[in-house]
Structures are given as C-alpha cells and as structure tokens.
Image: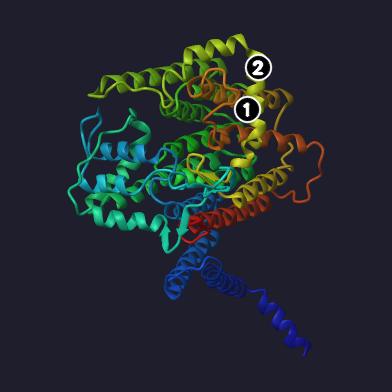
Amino acid sequence: MENALQKLKLYCKKPVVYLTAGYLALQICMVGLVYYWRVFYDYSGSAFKLTALCCFIATALFAAIYFLASHVKTFATKAAGIIALCGIFFCFANPPLQAPDESVHYQRSYAISMGRFDFNYDRGYPSDVNAFLASFPGAWTNAITSYWAHTEPVTGDVIDAGSSANYPIKIKGSHREWMGLQFQQYSTLKHQALEGGHEPVMFQVIPFLPQAMGMALARIFGADALGCLYAGRLMNLAVYTVLCWLALKNCKRYQTLFVAFMLLPLSLYLAASLSYDAMLLGLYYLTASYYCADEIKTKDVVVFLVAFVLMNAVKPWISLLWLVLPLVLPQKAWTTKIKKWQLALMGMAGALAITFFVEWYGRAMRLNYPEIGRMLGSEVVNGGSQLAFVLQNIPRTIAVFLGTLYENNFYLGQLGVFGALDLELPLVQLMSIMVLMLATALAVHEKSSLTPRSALGLGILALCYIAAVMGALYITYTPVGMVRVLGVQARYMLPPFLMLFVLLAALLSHVLEPKLPQTTKAIHLELGVSCVVALASAVLLFQHYFIGPAYLMPN
C-alpha cells in the first residue's frame, strides 16, 4: 500500500499531470463563463456555439503559453510573446473606433496605405470605408448615453432622474441597442455606393506607417474596411511588442515593473489600437530602460538617440524631457567615450530638427483645408491669454493642478478607463493598481539600483513630466482661468508613473527585507500575474460591449 502511494505521489509530480489539470481547469472556466453570461446577463444567442468558441480560444491560448514556457529561453522573448498574445485579445475585444481618436487615426492610416503622403481635405475614401465610418461612432458608450427625469405634473418638481452613462448596452422595451447592431449596419451599407467626407485634421505620417502597412497588406488579400482596421491594429501591436522586447533586453533591473506597465490593460488597449500611442509607449519604455542598464555603451547611446528623436517626431516638445534621463544616470554606468553633454547636444539638435521638419511638412503638404479652430472655440480657449494668466497667478495654477490630481485620484484610479474617458471598468482599475503594487514589492530585492543623486533626478523628472502634461492641456485645451485642467487622461501619465514606481521600489529596498530574493522567480511571477490580469481585463472589455451589463431604460 505504501509503495502504491509513493508511486502515485511521484506520478502526480510529473509535468503532464499539471498540464492536464491546468487545461481541464481552463476549459471548466470557459464553460462557467458562458453559463454566467447566460444566467446573469440573459445571453440570448446560441450557448453551444459560444461555449465551443470559448473552449477553442482557450485551447489555442493554452498551447501558445505552453510553447512560450517550454521552448523560449530568454525572459525578454517570453515576455514579448505574452505581450503579443494578450494584445491580440484586446485587438478583437475592443470594438472598432473606440480607442482615443481612432476614427481620425484610421482615416489618416488608410490614406497613407493608398500612397497618399500629402493631406488633401477634398479627397475622399472608397465606399466601404465611408460605410465603416458611418456605422461605428467613436466613443460609443458616451454617444448613446441617455438622460431622463420624471417630474411632478402640478409643481414641475423632479421626482427622480438618472442616466445610462458607462453602459454600452441599452434595453428599452423589446429594443436592444448595442455594438452588434453596428456590425449589421456596416454589413448592409458597405454594398452601397456611399459618398465620403473629407480627410481628417491630422497632419502626420511617421506614427501611422506601421498600421498603414498592415492595411495595405490586408487590401492586397481582399480585406474590406473592417478587415483593414484589424490588420492595422495587429501591425501596431507588433511594433509595440518589438519595442517592449528591446526594452526588456536592455533592462538589468526592475524588469518586474517594466513587465507590469507593458502588460497593463490600458497599455495593451492602446497598443492593440490604431492610436499612435502604441508606438509612443513602446518608445517610452525603451528609453526608460536605459535607466536600468548596468552599462551605457556607444551602441546604447545610438539606440537611445534614435528612440528619442523618433518619439519627438510622434509627440513633439513634451518628449524633450526624456533627454534628462541619461543625464541623471550614475556616472559608473557611463562607459562610452561620448560625454553626457555631447549626448544632450546631439539629442536636442535631432529632436528640434525632426520637430520642425514634421511641422513644416504638415503645412507644406496641406491642401484645401479650411481654417482649423480649437475644439472648444478660440473665444473660449485662448493659449496666449491662458499663458499670461498662468504666469501672473503661479500659486493659483499650482493649486489648480493639485486639485485636478486630487479629484481624479492622481489618475492611478483611471487605469481602467478605456477610450477617451469613455468606458470605465472599476474592477480593471483595482487589478491594475494591485499588479503595480506586486511588481514594486517583487523589485525590492534590487538594492544596487539608485544613487541619491540619480534618485533625486528621477523623481524631479517624473514630477516635471506630470506638470508638463497638465500645463500643456491647461494652456491649449482649457478655458482661461478655469479651476480644473481639462483633457488629462491616465494614458498620458504612464511614463511618469513608471519612473515613480521604480523610485518607490528603490526607496523600499533600503527599509524592507525581501522574502523572494531570486530575480528569476520574481520576474516570472510578475509575468504570470500580469498576463492573467490582462486576459481577464480583455474578457471584461468584451463582456461590457457585447454581453452585458445592459441598462434598462425607463418607458
């Protein structure tokens, strides 16, 4: 009997047993998920077909993760594979044109894919693109938000009131308004000869080249406008994945934090869209990784300069702040013959050159555009007047910035807001913060991280970056003298958040005794947790747009 038990224990320790148990558990979760949707959200489609689809996707996911875990040796490549895998889920879970400004980015990318490298307002698009743009309104959740109020007939007093904000699905009587209807509308309209509008007010080429290439390849194989959207998203995701891979290869410390930020649901949401934030975030993470390198060689300086200049081509002026990063590096890590002041001069010259070129190109290649005004109108938003007001009231401006941060939970509470402040998923916000806390805790063992001078420099850079983001939007986007800063979103804060969490981990390493000192275990644990959170967030995003919860509209 004892021999039989020992044999059973030895057999249960075999990898095939764990793999089989994990696979079965995953399939049970898929069946339970569909059952949950059917019961709680009254899913009316074919439960059998949906279950079969979920089980098939789970099988493909399990096989991909198994391949990465067993056949890929380096951590950077494993993490890049996980980033690509999770990003694919976000690519298809997020409905068309729901990412920030994705409608405008789609139009510009499609134009470039057709060989249009100038900007002509009077030029239109093929009929299927016109049907696509007409069928999918941007910011769907806000676009269909309804407000209602019941009043007392005699006095006119409001008895009760409400709104359907943050609900992408509405049900009123027997009518169901949801994203699926937009796919049906597109399927009908794309066969009609619809006349189009105009090319968008977006005068850049460089940040849209990856998605334009994906669209061009998709059209070669006969894809329609909808297929081009997904091809562009996947190409954008591929660029983000490669940049993250380069960043992780370069990181010698704080890989847990970099992985956590790269796999944040908000980061993946942007990476798997047509937003140029995909390229920008990848460049940010690559540039920041040099802060965590043991040695800075000449080739590292070259790559840093290329990334720095490119990010200034995508997001000019504010990206100049990244030039401070190598200047605050510990001198012992600086092994190249290039001096820091030489790097600063080369970076500044390259950034200004590309910035002025992009601005000149946008003006010189612009044809037939009418006068382009500000979103809120030049009478409401006046940059010159606002700048003068700020300079005359600096203490008040600081108070406005602090109040805006406080009211928005310092934007750490908006890591689960998707779109242009559109759909909010509180559970994703909570999981995102917990993932960052775990990554910080797992990075505590990295004690050879920051000198006091470099830590101070990193902290100042992060705070200046936050102030620059808020200042830019306060001057260019906010009415003069307003006591809040309009337009700030959590996606703008991801770079300084990364700096601040690295700084927090470095400071905690001096006061805490790590329980998991092995770097390999720490980074793989963080990779696994971040992967699970990212996949769960993609499922929640899909659920909110296509399954439920639905808002029952009053009659």
Q: Is residue 263 visible?
A: no
Q: How is the image coloured?
A: rainbow
Residue that numbered label 2 is attached to: 396
Quadrant for residue 8, please give it. bottom right
Q: State the mark number for residue 462.
A: 1
Residue 451 at x, y = what percent? Answer: 72, 27
Given the image, on which type of amino acid does mark 1 rest? Ala
Q: Residue at x 62, y 52 (%)?
A: 427
Report the residue that reaches farthest toward the left: 193
Residue 174 at x, y = what percent? Answer: 42, 64
Residue 271 at x, y = what percent? Answer: 46, 44
Which element carries disc 1, helix, strand or loop?
Answer: helix
Q: Is residue 345 visible?
A: yes
Looking at marks 1 and 2 on the same chain, the residue that comes earlier in the sequence is marked by: 2
Q: Nearer the viewer, residue 494 or 67?
A: 494
Quadrant for residue 35, please give it. bottom right
Q: Nearer the viewer, residue 533 or 39?
A: 39
